[in-house]
């Protein structure tokens, strides 16, 4: 569909900054999630670069693990967000998600 095509094009632009390519990858992963293709979405999230995007990767991998009822994996991913230094802006959401896990 149109969103998938636009995100794909943004990832292919050689001159695009890392942030733009990462945002496009997240968009592609969200499209896959909406289609119920969680494993395909996970592959896209796993490809996010570390450094400034590691927290985003871990948070989304935690969400996917929750959706697949893999509580231990969800816990690991959300804890990884909390362990980020400097602290991640996603830390509060990860903390909330951990609090709701059984």
Image (tube, rainbow, N blue to C red):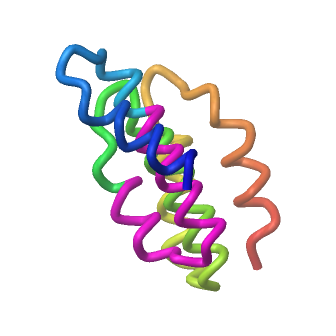
* Residue pictured at 57% horizontal, 68% vertical: 64
Residue at the farthest left position: 14
* Residue pictured at 50% horizontal, 40% vertical: 56
Quadrant of the frame with the N terminus = bottom right
| Count of numbered circles on the image | 0
Q: Position of residue 10 (x, y in %)?
A: 37, 31
Residue span colored magenta:
23-45
Left/right placement of residue 60 relative to residue 80 reads right
Quadrant of the frame with the C terminus = bottom right
- Which sits in the foreground, 6 or 56? 6
* Residue pictured at 44% horizontal, 46% vertical: 5
Q: From what the image shows, is residue 65 above or below residue 24?
A: below
- Which sits in the foreground, 82 or 19? 19
Left/right placement of residue 65 relative to residue 49 reads right
Please say whether residue 41 is one of the residues in the magenta stretch.
yes
Q: Position of residue 72 (x, y in %)?
A: 53, 78
Q: From what the image shows, is residue 8 above or below residue 51?
A: below
Main SS of residues in magenta: helix
Residue at the farthest bottom position: 69
* Residue pictured at 53% horizontal, 53% vertical: 79
Left/right placement of residue 28 relative to residue 89 reads left
Q: Position of residue 28 (x, y in %)?
A: 47, 51
Q: Position of residue 7 (x, y in %)?
A: 45, 40
Please say whether residue 95 is one of the residues in the magenta stretch.
no
Residue 89 position by quadrant: top right
């Amino acid at each position: 569909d149109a969103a998938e095509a636009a995100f794909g094009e943004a990832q292919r632009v050689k001159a695009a900054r890392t942030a733009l390519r990462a945002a496009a990858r997240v968009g592609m992963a969200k499209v896959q999630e909406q289609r119920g293709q969680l494993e395909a979405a996970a592959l896209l999230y796993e490809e996010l670069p570390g450094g400034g995007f590691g927290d985003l990767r871990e948070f989304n991998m935690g969400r996917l693990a929750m959706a697949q009822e893999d509580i231990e994996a969800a816990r690991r991913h959300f804890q990884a967000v909390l362990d980020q230094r400097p602290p991640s802006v996603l830390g509060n959401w990860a903390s909330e998600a951990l609090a709701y896990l059984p």
